[in-house]
Image (spheres, rainbow, N blue to C red):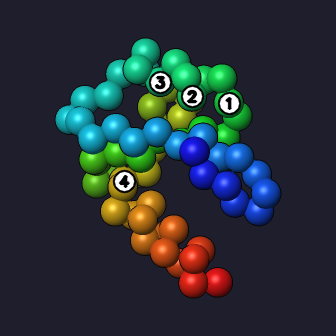
Amino acid sequence: MALKNERFWPVEVKWAAQIHANELKQLSKYAKSIVLTKKKEKGMLDRFPTIPVPLALLELESLCDQ
């Protein structure tokens, strides 16, 4: 979970070679959910955007610098 601009952003981290959509049942309860992954590229899993963990951490760092 993350808060940005007073908004709730559900985040789940999956550090596995394979991720299955049925593992993301909790995220399906929320709009704007994202999955942070071990993969090296952004993508989609079912209806959830996926972002590599290192990239997400870099983006978080830039948000903190503002």
Circle nearer the viewer, 4 or 1:
1
What's the CA distance linking mark 2 and mark 4? 17 Å
Residue drawn at the location 60% of the way across and 41% of the way down:
10
What's the CA distance linking mark 4 and mark 3? 16 Å
What's the CA distance linking mark 3 and mark 1? 11 Å
Judging depth in this view, the residue of 22 and 43 nearest the camera is 22
**Pointer 3 with pointer 2, Cβ within 8 A:** yes
Q: In terms of secondary structure, where does tag 2 sit?
A: helix
Q: Which residue is mark 4?
A: 52
Q: Report whether 37 appears left or right of 5.
A: left
**Pointer 4 with pointer 3, Cβ within 8 A:** no
Q: In terms of secondary structure, where does tag 4 sit?
A: strand
In the picture, the disc for residue 3 is none
Q: Is residue 18 above or below residue 32?
A: above
Residue drawn at the location 57% of the way across and 84% of the way down:
65
Q: Which residue is mark 1?
A: 30
Callout 4 crowding tier (Cα within 10 Å): few <14, some 14–19, many ≥20: some
Residue at the extreme left: 17
Circle nearer the viewer, 4 or 3:
3
Q: Which residue is mark 2?
A: 27
What's the CA distance linking mark 3 and mark 2? 5 Å
Q: Which residue is mark 3?
A: 24
**Pointer 2 with pointer 1, Cβ within 8 A:** yes
Which quadrant of the rendered structure holds the C terminus?
bottom right
Residue 19: image location, x then y, percent: 32, 28
What's the CA distance linking mark 4 and mark 1? 20 Å
Callout 1 crowding tier (Cα within 10 Å): few <14, some 14–19, many ≥20: few
Q: In terms of secondary structure, where does tag 3 sit?
A: helix
